[in-house]
Amino acid sequence: MRRPTIADVARQAGVSKGAVSYALNGQPGVSESTRARILAIAEEIGWRPSSAARTLNDARAHTVGLALCRPARVLGVEPFFMELVSGIEAELSARSYALMLQVVADHGREIEVYRRWWGEGRIDGAILVDLHVDDPRVAGLEALGLPTVVLGHPSGAGTLPAVWSDDGRAVHETVEYLVALGHRRIARVGGLPRLVHTALRDRAFTGACAGLGAEQVTAHTDYTGEEGARATRRLLSSPVRPTAIVYDNDIMAVAGLSVSREMGLDVPRDLSIVAWDDSPLSQVVRPPLTALSRDIPAYGGHAARRLLALIAGDQVTAFEDRAARLTPRDSTAPPLAGAG
């Protein structure tokens, strides 16, 4: 896995390296049709001029890229990504590597950013997050030859090594706990349905509720507190409201707690609440939230270590981290008699 070179362009175009140099530098010596073909091939394989390559052949950038396709305003308030980045940074800095971070508007732009960074010699590898079903970024990064580790389930990572945890196991543990408390109408406020981990949680939640005889409903959101609040209002305004709600992140769970109070419900007497990705935010509210806890900085550290090994040329395979574990707190309790 290496950056595209002038030799790669020349080989694909069927011309000499000198001709490629003329074409790329706008110099005479090649026909306009040949120049156009060379420029198109250079763009297709992601070749970019590298200042590092001009001074030191095969020099490393000692930098890892992370492009995030999500609103910057969400990143500023969501504990998950801040903890994830802290874990990545801790591992990279210990090896004298830096993290290059950029927020992008869509997946096409994300692939282009990686293509530019890699072609210009600005990064040695990348970490791919928010894995989607049939994610075009996977094939794009495979084609670039950019050393990449995916944070997500291996089923959607193609040939790229993945770091993941078993969300299905965590979902089953949560539903079993709520059913053991006596809940029979359980809702889930999930994230974006096109995300691989959301789809896996959807299936696990439906299966766990069906297997344990509980009614279930899932509402999908964009992970923001605003959308979490709206979903909670809809669920609690239904003719037969749930007695427990599981939220896919702590921001939405806190928003759900606020909505329940707004609607005159007591937590946990009238409604039990469970949050994914335990954080200080889950613990400082009242009542403190029952949460699915995992070591998110360590999760980021696992990804960074494996990426550095990949950059060094080592063979790297998928790594399964510990599944999130339920930490009961004061936001869950048996439902009122007759509530189900």
Image: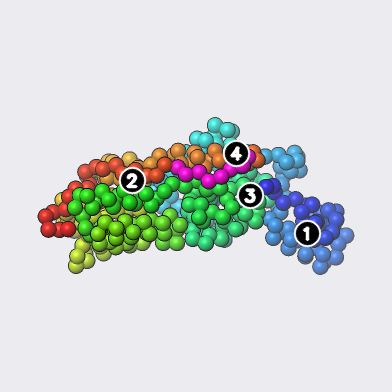
Residue type highlighted by circle 4: Ala
Q: What distance separates the C-alpha of mark 4 from that of mark 2?
A: 30 Å
Residue located beneath label 4 in the image:
309
* Element type where label 1 sits in the image: helix
Tag 1 near tag 2, CB within 8 Å: no
Of callouts 1 and 3, the N-terminal one? 1
Query: Residue 117's x, y, as percent?
Result: 63, 49
Q: Quadrant of residue 209?
A: bottom left
Of callouts 4 and 2, the N-terminal one? 2
- Residue 224 shows in the view: no
Q: Is residue 69 left or right of residue 199?
A: right
Query: Residue 226's x, y, as percent?
Result: 33, 58
Q: Please report the bounds of the magenta region as a residue range.
A: 314-321
State how many labels appear.
4
Prevailing secondary structure class for the magenta stretch in the rendered image: loop
Q: Quadrant of residue 227?
A: bottom left
Residue type highlighted by circle 1: Gln
Tag 2 near tag 3, CB within 8 Å: no
Q: Nearer the viewer, mark 4 or mark 3?
A: 4
Q: Residue at (83%, 53%) from the top-left corner?
A: 17
- Residue 140 shows in the view: yes
How many C-alpha atoms fall within 10 Å of the one at disc 4: few (<14), some, or many (≥20)? few
Residue located beneath label 2 in the image:
292
